[in-house]
Amino acid sequence: MQLTDLSTPALVLDRQRLAKNCAAMRDRMIAQGVALRPHLKTAKSLEVAREATGGPQGPWGGAITVSTLAEARYFAAAGWRDITYAVGLAPGKLAEAAALQESGLCLTLLTDNLACVAAAAEEAAARAARFRFLIEVDCGGRRGGVDPESDTLIAIGQELQAAPGLDLVGVLTHAGHSYHCRGAEAIRQVAEQERAGAVRAAERLRQAGLPCETVSAGSTPTAVHSASMSGLTEMRPGVYMFFDLDQMGIGACALSDLALSVVATVIGHNPRAGRILIDAGGLALSKDTSAAEFLDRVGYGLVCDLETLAPLADLYVAEVHQEHGLIAAATGAPPYDLLPFGRKLRILPNHACMTAAAYPGYWITDGGLAVHDRWERVNGWN
Amino acid sequence: MQLTDLSTPALVLDRQRLAKNCAAMRDRMIAQGVALRPHLKTAKSLEVAREATGGPQGPWGGAITVSTLAEARYFAAAGWRDITYAVGLAPGKLAEAAALQESGLCLTLLTDNLACVAAAAEEAAARAARFRFLIEVDCGGRRGGVDPESDTLIAIGQELQAAPGLDLVGVLTHAGHSYHCRGAEAIRQVAEQERAGAVRAAERLRQAGLPCETVSAGSTPTAVHSASMSGLTEMRPGVYMFFDLDQMGIGACALSDLALSVVATVIGHNPRAGRILIDAGGLALSKDTSAAEFLDRVGYGLVCDLETLAPLADLYVAEVHQEHGLIAAATGAPPYDLLPFGRKLRILPNHACMTAAAYPGYWITDGGLAVHDRWERVNGWN
């Protein structure tokens, strides 16, 4: 099969770029002396997880991070045994967490509050189960997490340690604000905040006589540009496997690193509006426009050649409706002759995590027109 | 089962509101004397289609509109026999269209260009098939379609009529720009543009000696507020079945009409940022922010009571990450006591079409806490 044979829209993953991105991240972690626990929230795929880690019995110990219990179930069923669910736990998910553990999974949960600890202690007692917890620390992203200097951090640690069915494993932080930095130096400063916040929280727990084996940090930008990971035990980047225009805009990767794209077909021209219409719209590309923070005229994605994935002139997807994308040129009218009715092309998306979620799987290429394989994804929550 | 039992995030559809919205639209079409060919792009569900039309053998003739061939396949397999695929056709989809027709489906396709007609004529000859086409007309939305006054309209009509395997069925237009009007009077003006554009195109085809049985128009706002549908044969609204904050913002519905919501759970508080965290983020709610065009402080959705679906104070989802939503109050700090850890709530989404697409189906309520049923959706393209 060839890319030209795909019914559009279709999601395509370049396996060579994926392999290069995964190898580069492993090399960085080896150089920094920390473990890599890649976040599978972007890829949601067994084959991608194998490429990132060497597999559940691979040299990285099969340690992975997930964003849903559906991902945990999917990877556990394929043999992964060391999974961190890195979203603050809702109490309604304890029963499923316990069920997953009964299948042999070492599952680590996340919390930033005492109410969660109390609910987990109760559930552990009721089920004669044990739950492992990391305490979420806010290193400046102001999403979830406790202040590393707070009394709450110690109080949560003490409660986790005191409850018979709970284990305090360590601390976890995520510098989400690194996505809003431009360039390596700005990212490096956030990476140091991230490192310092996690390490400080670990120090304070240890000073209080509490265990803190794991000191977990990581976003793709900070994993790429961090100057020091001293005191950390692991990093959890995720989108680096594919990268996207957003990561390119902040300076975490180059255009030639982008591994994910959407194949679309030209379905019409509207010269009165200066637009070329394609059959990939808001559902196929997502309505995420995060790359616009630092890049001009990227819209909902850059228009590229079907085979080479090289950008076509200055064309981008300027507008989306549910099933329509409207291509514009950055200046002037788009080259209608270059993109006649029926021509297939590829769109490099803004935000890989959001775009990939619309598809049940990936068509796999090695950089040319040939389609070599089909890899499934685990979408949704249940 | 109760809403409190659902694993979150979960998609919930209020069957009573759905029924009321569907009945009101049927009544409007009866009053205007045009057929209703509801667009299933939002709902993608057999049960919703039955509610909207009375079913494939119902009083409305089982006529529906779809946005993907996956929807066409799904509804055809359940007995629907009169389906319009209302997205400009890509030539790669002709083979599947032919296969669907062989199963007994009367499928009507859409085009706005001669290259598509040539490709369809060739495919029809090669397969000894027939393809039915509507010509897409641009009534001011500047997406797809030809100018109703253009020579191209007549040329496409003549080619469709001349090709042995093709049938010219009529014209179709969609006033997408009605989504950017505020209030009934502004929408009424766009509705008249939509009507006049479609009717003018039909007149010109007939004057050229060409058939034009179908004169199809419709968006939800114009179907709700149109003063006259004279000359039209059918309307194709879709989102009216559920409505959403975007439709409320432009004045197409009231808050009490909104039938779709997402159940989420409070997973933490971040008083330093003035935020309450829930487990419904950018994937669960979508990143669509269209309601912000006319409504202040709706963000990614309004926060409502789990049982009554009444808005909770002035709370809205101010920020989303992949699996996190951050609730803020329009003024001041959010009421942490009202939404403690573990509390479930419901979010009224910005744009029902985008939000629903993240879920494999609906949990059905009749306005209370009880969950009565589960209805599946047909997502994706293949």
Image: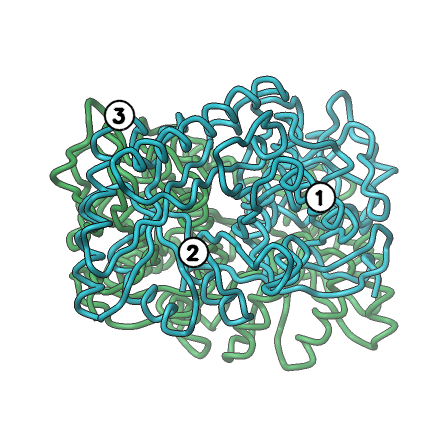
Chain colours: A green, B cyan
Q: Which residue is mark 1?
A: B21
Dot 3 crowding, Cα within 10 Å, few <14, some 14–19, many 20+: few
In front: B185, or B260? Answer: B185
Q: Position of residue B91 (x, y in %)?
A: 24, 56
| Mark positioned earlier in the residue sequence (2 or 1) | 1
- Quarter-of-image position of residue B252: top right
- Cα–Cα gap, marks 1 and 3: 36 Å
Res B171 → quadrant: top left
Q: Which of the two residues, B257 or A88, is positioned nearer the viewer here?
A: B257
Residue A246, horizontal then vertical, whole percent: 38, 39
Looking at this view, name the residue that lies furthest to the left. Answer: A337
The label on residue A272 is 3
Residue A237 appears in view: yes
Q: Residue at x 35, y 68 (%)?
A: A51
Examine the rendered structure and indicate whether residue A317 appears above or below residue A307: above
**C-alpha distance separating marks 2 and 1:** 24 Å
Residue at horizontal 46 percent and vertical 24 percent from the top: B193
* Residue, disc 2: B68
